[in-house]
Image (spheres, rainbow, N blue to C red):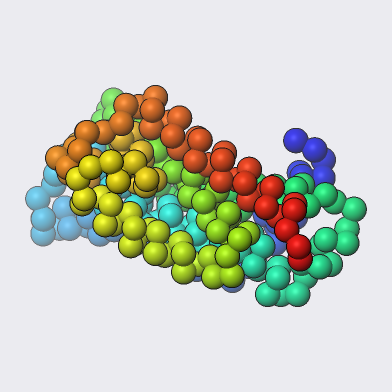
Amino acid sequence: MSSRVSLVALWSFSQLLFSPRTLGMAILATTPVLIALVYRATVALEIAAESSGPAAFSVLSAAVSLPFVAPMLALFYASGVVTDDAEAGTLHYFLTRPVARRDLLFGRMLGNLTIVACLFLPPFVLCYYLTIAGSGWQELGSHFPTLVRHILAASLGIFAYSGLFSLAGTVLKRPLLFGLFFVFGWQAAASIVPGAVRYLTVTHYMHSLMPHESFQGTLAGLIGPRSSTPAAILALLAIGAFTHAIAVWVFANKEI
């Protein structure tokens, strides 16, 4: 990685870290933590019966964190990789700097990925502790592979989503609308349609990496077989790498 890419990524991260957008996204990222706290409170007050800690974490992860929080964080940052500067009137200023276009966009995307990871992963890990610690501290260690598998699915999914939405932000004038349609329209429809359509979604490969106690993963198994773990990992890496590369190529060659 060149020093110019690193500088752009660091600058982009610092700008995003103190932006109003990040405050809103931080609230979104902590939503699963609030749900986990409510769950622990209802169990402590004997309002609800306590379920298995790993099962509760898997349900929370499958219902909130992975299908909603992760793609929304990626969308609201990656889709603005070009349009944010264009709307602010600073894009032409950046293009006059002694930085190649590919380095500029690559650095911006790297900064976006970093801020999304910093917002998503700490609350995600905290949810694991909140839901499982009530079953005993020994449960935390014995079910640690469950957390690792969820983090792998989330990280690769964020990488794939970020590439897809960065590409949309490079070629479309309204990338946010495309992202919302893709997440809540196309993927929601494809997940309930039997057949090969599910292979054209990110969620299929994320669910393929999740433990089998995930109820959404089980549902995915009912309407079609999961991809193998190596295939799901390779698919998410390929989606992310391909879309990021195409976004850089388009931005480096487009007329602005």
> Could you say which is closer to the camera, residue 77 or residue 171?
171
Q: Is residue 210 above or below residue 194?
A: above
**Residue 109 at x, y percent in the picture:** 64, 50
What residue appears at the point 35 percent right and 27 percent down from the top-left corner?
Answer: 229
**Residue 148 at x, y percent in the picture:** 39, 32
> Could you say which is closer to the camera, residue 211 or residue 161?
161
**Residue 212 at x, y percent in the picture:** 22, 33
Work out whether residue 48 can be spotted: yes
**Residue 95 at x, y percent in the picture:** 83, 61
Work out whether residue 137 can be spotted: no
Q: Quadrant of residue 185?
A: bottom left
Q: Is residue 139 above or below residue 91?
A: above
- Give the quarter of the figure containing the N terminus: top right
Q: Quadrant of residue 52?
A: top left
What residue appears at the point 85 percent right and 51 percent down from the top-left corner?
Answer: 99
> Could you say which is closer to the camera, residue 155 or residue 220?
220
What residue appears at the point 76 percent right and 44 percent down from the top-left corner?
Answer: 6
- Give the quarter of the figure containing the C terminus: bottom right
Q: Is residue 110 left or right of residue 151?
A: right
